[in-house]
Image (cartoon, rainbow, N blue to C red):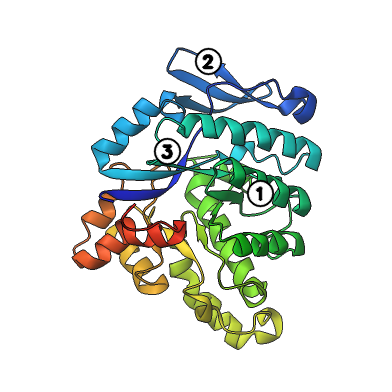
Amino acid sequence: MSGMIDVHTHYVPNGWPDLQDDAGPEAPWLKAHTEIEASIMMGTREFRRIQADCWNIEWRLRDMDADGVYAQVVSPTPVFFNYGRSPAEATRIARIFNDLALEIVAPAPDRLIPFCQVPLQDTDAACRELERCLEQGHRGVEIGNHVGDVDLDSAGVVTFLQHCASLDVPVFVHPWDMADSPRLDRWMAQWLTAMPAETHLSILAMVLGGVFDRIDDRLKIAFAGGGSFAFWLGRMENAWHRRNDVIGTSKYPPSHYLGRFYVDSVVFDERALRLLVDTVGKDRVLVGSDYPYPLGKRPVGEVVRKSDFLTDDVSQLILRGNAERFLGLSSTN
């Protein structure tokens, strides 16, 4: 296989059945503006304007070729998770979007790797939908970094992650449903501060919540935008040692769990990438782009390819080799 593997991209179908009966008045729907432009609507509220690169494979493959990307992991757009709905509603919606995802990637099965979504608020339903999707052709699962006020160290989520480990299914964790306040309404501050904080908090929950102590080390889990974790690891480590009476809930200090998870490379800056690689390890960083959304990184992998501190061997690990291991691919695929 030549070219990069991008583990962080999203899709949106160009239409789906009316979900209002299941999802209520805030049900997502697609408002078409032209043949190539649309808006994701949540009831009467516009959530995001999108283009045909969300669903049009010719557009996607064209952009992949331009950036030197051989394969993409194609994951749901988190707004469709529906963790706040009933398990039955969320399951039906997940099935609809998971089946539509397979239709989108079908024309290029060697280059587009579908990840499904599951109703994570119900462990049994999530496990059943995961198994159904694997049988249908999905290769992994994307989950949100929390379910309401419940973090990734909750018993139900841990059971689901254990199931993923037993099936050798890669898990991609994406921040969503970020904190909101008037102070975050300016400058896209939710995306500039709250989103990185959400990812850091979810890694914190996995570590201090003892998830890595309880779960099989076969679990392959990656976090979108995990770069902020590297900057704050020392703060976590200091607190674990100095206030162990409060946060000593993991068996070992936080640095012990480096090597148990992956992060993507969406840090936009060589200095941040250097810290990320130095902290989590050269074998734990994956190329990600957040394609096709406007705050993503294009050209894909640019910060990796332009970082002089990386040797050619390490660059190849980040651009492709680590993703092959995370996804269970052979380098000859």
Give whichever of discs 3 and 1 has the lower sequence position.
Answer: 3
Horizontal side of residue 325 vs 84, given as left or right = left
Q: Position of residue 288 (x, y in %)?
A: 39, 50
**Residue at 23% of width from left, 67% of height from top?**
313
Task: Using the numbered discs, state the Cα–Cα distance from disc 3 to disc 1 in whole angstroms.
Answer: 19 Å
Task: Using the numbered discs, state the Cα–Cα distance from disc 2 to disc 3 in whole angstroms.
Answer: 27 Å
**Residue at 20% of width from left, 68% of height from top?**
311
Q: Nearer the viewer, residue 306 or 73?
A: 73
Q: Which amino acid does the dot numbered 3 rest on?
A: Pro
**Residue at 18% of width from left, 63% of height from top?**
308
Task: Give the labeled residue for mark 2.
Answer: 32
Q: Residues within 10 Å of mark 1 (few under 14, many from 20)?
A: some
> Which is more foreground, mark 2 or mark 1?
1
Q: Are marks 2 and 3 in contact (CB under 8 Å)?
A: no
Residue 275, located in which quarter of the rendered image?
Answer: bottom left
Task: Give the labeled residue for mark 3.
Answer: 109
Task: Give the labeled residue for mark 1.
Answer: 131
Vertical order, 307 against 184 (above or below):
below
Q: Position of residue 137 (x, y in %)?
A: 54, 42
Q: Position of residue 4 (x, y in %)?
A: 30, 50
